[in-house]
Structure formats: C-alpha cells, structure tokens
Image: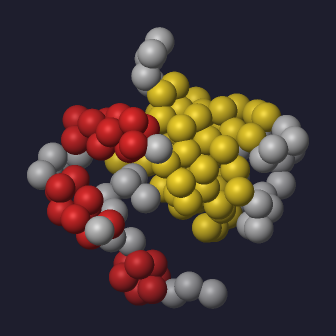
Amino acid sequence: MNTPSDKTERRHYERVPFIAEVIMSDGTSEWTSALLDISLKGVLLEPPSDIEPEFDKTYDIELILGEETEIKMRGKISHAKGAHWGLEWENIDLESLSHLRRLLELNMNDPDEINRELSDLG
C-alpha cells in the first residue's frame, strides 16, 4: 500500500483539471467516462458505475477535443479508488502527444513546466 509520501515522490507530472468525456474500450466493450484531470503521463477518470476495473488489462482511451482533434492513447489502471480510476499511458502516438502537450501548455499555471516534464520523459 502506498503511503502519502510515496505518492508525493512518485508524482512528477503536473495534473491539470480538465472536464471532458472520453471513450474507453477494453477490446470487447466500449463506454463513455468522465475525464477529471490529465497529465503528461496519465488521466484520472470517472467510469460508469457498472464497469469494474481490471488492473491487468490495457484500455484504449480517446479524448475528443474538437471536430478534427483527438488524443488517442493506450493505458493501464494504476489505481482505483471509489468511483475514480487513474490510468497511466503505455502508448501514445506522436500526433496525440502533440495535442496533449498543447492542451497542457494552455491549462498549466506555468506553461514552461511542460518542457521540464518532457525532458524527464527522455
């Protein structure tokens, strides 16, 4: 079990509150979840109450930002608490990463922070 200090040390990426709907899929089913916040490394979602988290599964996540703009990624659940799931990216294409970067730049208190976080990713 993680202690609060463990969580503080592990979280290196600023989370940005961003309310939106995302489409999720586990390969057999598809559903809509509410996006609560997003970072360069993952998302916090509120899925439908009838969907149980499966920690060993990879989920497809699609965030529609506009008619021709979307962020698509694949991720796994890193934690689930109550009605919220935290997912960490496993795969994100270059175009989606570019859209994610722009979204974060526009919504961070310090837009230069995104460059520091990107350099941490390697």
Taking the image as shown, residue 29 lies to the left or right of residue 68, namely: right
Residue found at the far front of this picture = 94
Q: Quadrant of the C terminus?
A: bottom left
Q: How is the image coloured?
A: secondary structure
What residue appears at the point 61 percent right and 67 percent down from the top-left corner? 78
Q: Is residue 12 above or below residue 18?
A: below
Residue 85, percent from left and from top: 64, 56
Taking the image as shown, residue 79 lies to the left or right of residue 110, namely: right
**Residue 20 seen in the figure:** no
Residue 14: name its quadrant: bottom left
Residue 86, percent from left and from top: 58, 59
User: Looking at the image, which is closer to me, 61 or 19?
Assistant: 61
Residue 46, percent from left and from top: 64, 45
**Residue 63 seen in the figure:** yes
Q: Is residue 64 above or below residue 35?
A: above
Q: Quadrant of the N terminus?
A: bottom right
Residue 18, percent from left and from top: 42, 38
User: Looking at the image, which is closer to me, 75 or 47?
Assistant: 75
What residue appears at the point 35 percent right and 47 percent down from the top-left corner? 16
Q: Count numbered badges in the picture.
A: 0
